[in-house]
Structure formats: structure tokens, C-alpha cells
Image (cartoon, rainbow, N blue to C red):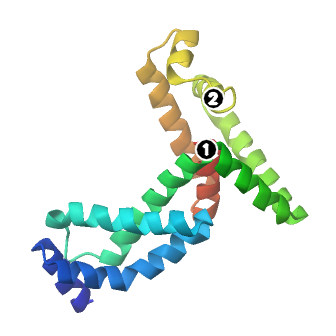
Amino acid sequence: MNVERDLVEGVKLGMASAFDQLYELYANRLYHFAFSILKSKQDAEEVVQNAFFKIWEKRYSLESNTSFKAYIFKIAYHVTVDLLRERLKEKKYQDNLIGKATANFNLEDSIDFADLLNQVNEIVKELPPRKSEIYQLSRVDHLSYGEIAEKLNISVKTVENAINFSIHFIKKRLGDDSLVILLYAALFL
């Protein structure tokens, strides 16, 4: 821990050698973390590069008395989720993901996926009626915030607030299982 703290202090001072040592300590672990989710070497490498780029950008505000490991993994998690969302929008990536899912399909996975969908649908029913309606229009009918606002004669900010509330509510109800949350994020956000 003292070595890590000294390296973080060095990075705060702009020492490239300290940054390189932190990179050596965590790059491989971050790569495996990102690869386990994204299933792409190139994307996992991109996550590592982006996470460390963010560290370098924020080097002056790093806290040496907190866990650097927790901080870098939190950054990597957010970069991974953002990249996953971006990739899911790409047709080629979707086709590749469907191909892998079909090749590795088994009944147990299908049941787990169906259970997650059912669980999310049940949680959505617990939302206040207006928030449930807005969530359904956004996530099921795929309307933009502007289209929902126009349709319901409310402000875009109200739509945004309702979606944020709904997502937070659903995540909270799904519990602390980060894999379930990640799957939920990939499918519905």
C-alpha cells in the first residue's frame, strides 16, 4: 500500500516513471476485467488505455490516501459500460454478439435471461403510473425524450427526471449483483 501511495504521489507530481509503474501494476488486471465483459481484445485494450488516460488527466486531483486500485477499477467499469453501450448500437457488433450467443446458447442461460426480463417488468409495474408510462415509452417503444415530452405534453426535463428515477429504482430493486446490473444496463439503457 505504501508503494502504491508513493506512486500516486509521483503521478500527482507529473512523474511519468511513477505512472508507468502504476500502469504495469494494473493494466493486465483491467484488461482481463474488461475482456470478461466485452469479449473483445481490442475493446479491452481500449478500456485500459482510456482508464489510464483519465488517470493522467486527473493526476493533480488524485488522492494518495485512498485506494488507487478501487479508483482505477471504478473508472474502468464506467469506461467499459460506456463502450458496451456504444458497441451495442453498432449493427456489426450486435450481429457478432447474437452469433456468439447462438453458438453458446443453452437452456439455462435462456431461462436466466427470461427471468431478468420478467424481473424488470415486475419492477416497472411498481413504479408510479406516470413514471412507468414514461419508462415504457422510452425503453419499450423507443421514443426519444423529445417525442415523449410532446406526446404527454410535459417538459423534456420531466421526462429525463422520470427516466433517471426509474433506472435508479430498477437498479436498486435488482440488488447488488453487479453482473445482473451490467446485463440490465446493456439491454435497457
Q: Report the Cα–Cα distance between label 2 and label 1.
A: 28 Å
Q: Residue at x 49, y 59 (%)?
A: 80
Q: Which sits in the foreground, 178 or 11?
A: 11
- Residue placed at 44% from the left, 58% from the top? 79
- Left of 78 or right of it: where is 186? right
Q: Image quarter for residue 141?
A: top right
Residue displayed at 90% across by 62% down: 107
Q: Is residue 119 left or right of residue 138?
A: right
The answer to whether 163 appears left or right of 11 in the picture is right
Label 2 SS: helix
Q: Is residue 81 visible?
A: yes
Q: Between disc 2 and disc 1, whose residue precedes?
A: 1
Q: Which residue is mark 2?
A: 132
| Tag 1 residue | 90
**Residue located at (18% from left, 78% from top):** 16
Position above or below: 119 against 51 = above
Tell me the amino acid under the disc marked 2.
Ser
Query: Callout 1, which amino acid?
Result: Glu
Residue located farthest toward the left when viewing the structure as drawn: 13
